Image: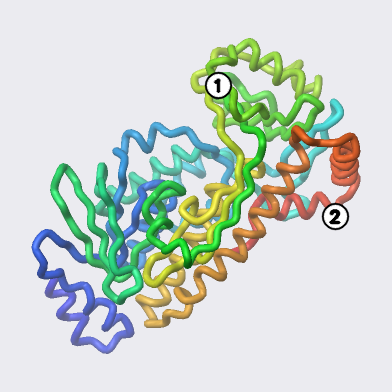
Amino acid sequence: MFEFYHMMAKSAIPELRCFARLRPHKSEGSVRTQVCIIGAGPSGLLLSQLLHLKGIESIVLERQTQEHILGRIRAGVLERGFVSLMHEAGAGARLDKEGFVHDGTMIAYDNRSFRIDFAKHAKSSVTIYGQTEVTRDLFAARAAAGGKILFSVEDVTIEDATSATPSVSFAQAGQGQRIDCDYVVGCDGFHGVSRRTIPAEVRTEFEKVYPFGWLGVLSQTPPVSTELIYASSARGFALCSMRNENLSRYYLQCPIDQNPDDWTDDAFWDELKRRIPEAASDQLITGASIEKSIAPLRSYMTEPMRWGNLFLCGDAAHIVPPTGAKGLNTAASDIHYLYHAMVQFYHDGDAGGLEAYSQKALARVWKTERFSWWMTSLLHRFPDQSAFDHRMQQAELAFLESSSGAQKVLAENYVGLPY
């Protein structure tokens, strides 16, 4: 490895100064890499794999074990941009084989439904493939490439983020360690250390908390529809989704203070049938739930998404309500911008992409926040909703049903805005 760096140092290629900075740090208990990524969820793993394929080194730190991460159940509607990134990362083979391509989705209200045709209005599609499987594929890709992921790390601290020599200290198995690097990337979610490292006086935060949650049930039953059904009803919102041809995911709007254990399976299925059109409820196959939980709905943004040589990605910087399936996909857009910016720097010595990262990422995220807010406002019942508000929802749904232009806007946002 050192012979390689020596050879590179004698050449005249643009990467000269970048590779020269890779010499191991002499301090006891420290290692050196180019990029330290905090968080081994799909965002952190995807960035690490993409950088590796461009010859850029990274180390990933993760608070949990790999088994814990793969045990988490998350949504699985992937935008076209995310699918492209998985292919670019060399991790798209199983996605192509097992994922379900959807060319549209159903919107239901007043006991009827209409279809939004993605292929017609956006010339694209989405892919149904569980986030757990995405993460599994990325773990496999990093393992095959010899990627370095440190699990069960504690007491992570980001130091000197605004200097040219940031570092990350942490403990693993009771031993203190440090990683010296060029850049730190926070993919560690809302409760992680990365965002909190940015001083409060530097951050501007925006938040909207919705007065309800989603009760979700996973069942080993065939999906009620070949495409997702977003249903608005007088009793509240419902969503019929799926993981595969024998694994279904259903959601009901519910009070946020309810306990999922208070819902029996029979009560859940009875309520779902009341909220979706009869044509769908007549086809619904029910069964025992294998997972049941309640998720809160909120919109959150922090600005900026860069502080010195610390960059935020995904939930570390922003959260969207699940309506419209944008959480993972919005994180992927962050990775797209940051990945290309780092390649531009390490290959060409041009830091312009890194300087523009926060502005570019935020511009797209705010548009995604708008779409998720609009979908949530359109389809849910609010506690303080007046008769006028309800009529406006009905008028908006009727307009969406009758307007090709309105359907085009929904389709373009759902399949994913361009990067």
Residue 246 visible in rendering? no
Q: Is residue 237 above or below residue 49?
A: above
The quarter of the displayed image where residue 159 is located = bottom left
Q: Residue at x 66, y 27 (%)?
A: 254
Is the residue marked by circle 1 packed among few (<14), some (14-19), or many (20+) residues within 10 Å? few
Q: Amino acid at mark 2?
A: Gly
User: Considering only order in the chain, which callout, 1 or 2, is on the residue closer to the N terminus?
Assistant: 1
SS of the residue at dot 1?
A: loop
SS of the residue at dot 2?
A: helix
* Quadrant placement of the N terminus: bottom left
Q: Which residue is mark 1?
A: 259
Q: Is residue 251 above or below residue 202?
A: above
- Percent across and percent down for residue 34 are 28, 68
The quarter of the displayed image where residue 386 is located = top right
Q: Residue at x 61, y 30 (%)?
A: 256
- Percent across and percent down for residue 269 are 66, 16
Is residue 134 found left or right of 323 in the rendered image? left
Q: Which mark is residue 405?
A: 2
Extreme residue toward the bottom, this view:
12
* Quadrant placement of the C terminus: bottom right
Q: In the depicted view, which residue is nearer to us: 369 or 10?
A: 369
The quarter of the displayed image where residue 209 is located = top right
